[in-house]
Image (spheres, grey):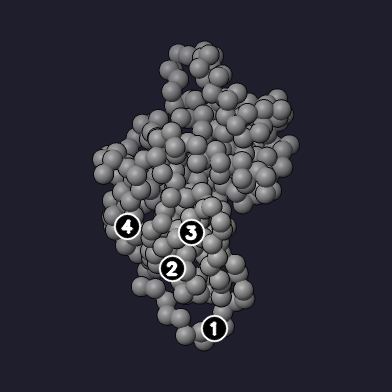
């Protein structure tokens, strides 16, 4: 498989397994949603895939190459990462922050951004609705505005693999849709997108496949219509929910009802 393959990934903190034998695969040209409650291991899995936390066991490959073992410069020309919240004390403009995405492609003697670099910075800012902010200082922006700038920076890398950790967490509804439409377009152009999300309905609408983690293990994996069902939501999230079907779309709609009581009979997924 030429996409992303994670096989038996294990991450430990002392005696505790943060990830316990996680395996998944995702093809290029698709969006895979990484779901699960707080503490399920979503962020750790993304960091482990990038080699930013060590694997106690398992492998991560992309396009057949071992991803964690790559030199950082080589990995930066292949994939981009958007963390939950990125801050900087430097007085950088929005344009400067997005231009950091072009650094892996610039030679050591390059004195100024190329015409291609400037074009990509402008294009990605416009795509995320941030063109009017280009000359603003990054640290003066709201959390949601900073998040969109960081996504623009990642897109400016022209990644073949894009990993995002809760990129919609600080965004209003319009901005959430704008970001996910952008990710969908990038996938349709051949990029492989792995995105951690909390909103099940956004994941259902924009993702080709879902991987649901629970306590560091894969509880379910597959198309949204196959994965999102009341029994799984009760077992993993501890909620009662109804699954509805919107007209003219295969995406299921999750309607939350109430929290499940602690002695609910639903068994946890292995």
Residue at position x 42%, y 80% in the image: 267
Q: Which mark is residue 215?
A: 2
The label number, if any, that marks residue 242 in the structure image: none
Crowd around label 1: few <14 · some 14–19 · many ≥20 (10 Å): few
- Could you say which disc has been placed on residue 23 in the image? 4
Could you tell me which secondary element the residue under label 1 belongs to? Answer: loop
Q: Return the x and y of residue 46 as percentages of the image width and height.
A: 43, 50
Q: Position of residue 98 (x, y in %)?
A: 58, 29
CA distance for labels 4 and 3: 14 Å
Q: Which residue is mark 1?
A: 262
Q: CA gap, disc 1 to disc 2?
A: 17 Å
In the image: residue 76, left or right of residue 88: left
Q: Earlier in the sequence, mark 2 or mark 4?
A: 4
Tell us which disc is closer to us: 2 or 4: 4
Q: Which residue is mark 3?
A: 35
Within-10-Å neighbours for mark 2: few <14, some 14–19, many 20+: some
Viewer-side residue, 198 vs 177: 177
- Disc 4 residue crowd, few under 14, some 14–19, many 20+, Cα 10 Å: some
Tell me if residue 246 comes above or below residue 51 in the rendering.
below
Label 1 vs label 2, nearer the camera: 1
Residue drawn at x 44%, y 43% is 193
User: Which quarter of the figure has residue 21?
Assistant: bottom left
């Amino acid at each position: 498989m030429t996409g992303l393959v994670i096989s038996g990934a294990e991450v430990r903190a002392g005696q505790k397994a943060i990830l316990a034998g996680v395996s998944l695969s995702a093809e290029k040209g698709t969006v895979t949603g990484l779901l699960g409650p707080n503490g399920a291991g979503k962020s750790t899995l993304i960091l482990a895939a990038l080699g930013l936390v060590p694997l106690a066991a398992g492998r991560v490959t992309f396009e057949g190459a071992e991803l964690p073992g790559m030199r950082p410069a080589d990995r930066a020309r292949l994939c981009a990462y958007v963390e939950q919240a990125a801050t900087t004390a430097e007085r950088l403009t929005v344009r400067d922050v997005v231009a950091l995405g072009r650094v892996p492609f610039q030679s050591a003697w390059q004195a100024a951004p190329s015409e291609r670099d400037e074009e990509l910075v402008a294009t990605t800012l416009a795509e995320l609705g941030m063109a009017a902010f280009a000359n603003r200082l990054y640290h003066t922006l709201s959390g949601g505005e900073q998040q969109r700038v960081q996504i623009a920076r990642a897109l400016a890398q022209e990644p073949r693999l894009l990993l995002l950790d809760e990129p919609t967490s600080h965004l209003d509804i319009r901005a959430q849709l704008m970001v996910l439409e952008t990710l969908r377009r990038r996938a349709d152009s051949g990029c492989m997108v792995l995105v951690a999300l909390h909103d099940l309905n956004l994941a259902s609408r924009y993702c080709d496949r879902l991987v649901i983690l629970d306590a560091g293990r894969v509880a379910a994996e597959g198309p949204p219509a196959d994965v999102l069902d009341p029994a799984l939501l009760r077992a993993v999230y501890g909620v009662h929910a109804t699954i509805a079907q919107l007209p003219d779309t295969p995406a299921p709609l999750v309607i939350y009802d109430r929290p499940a009581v602690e002695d609910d009979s639903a068994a946890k997924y292995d």
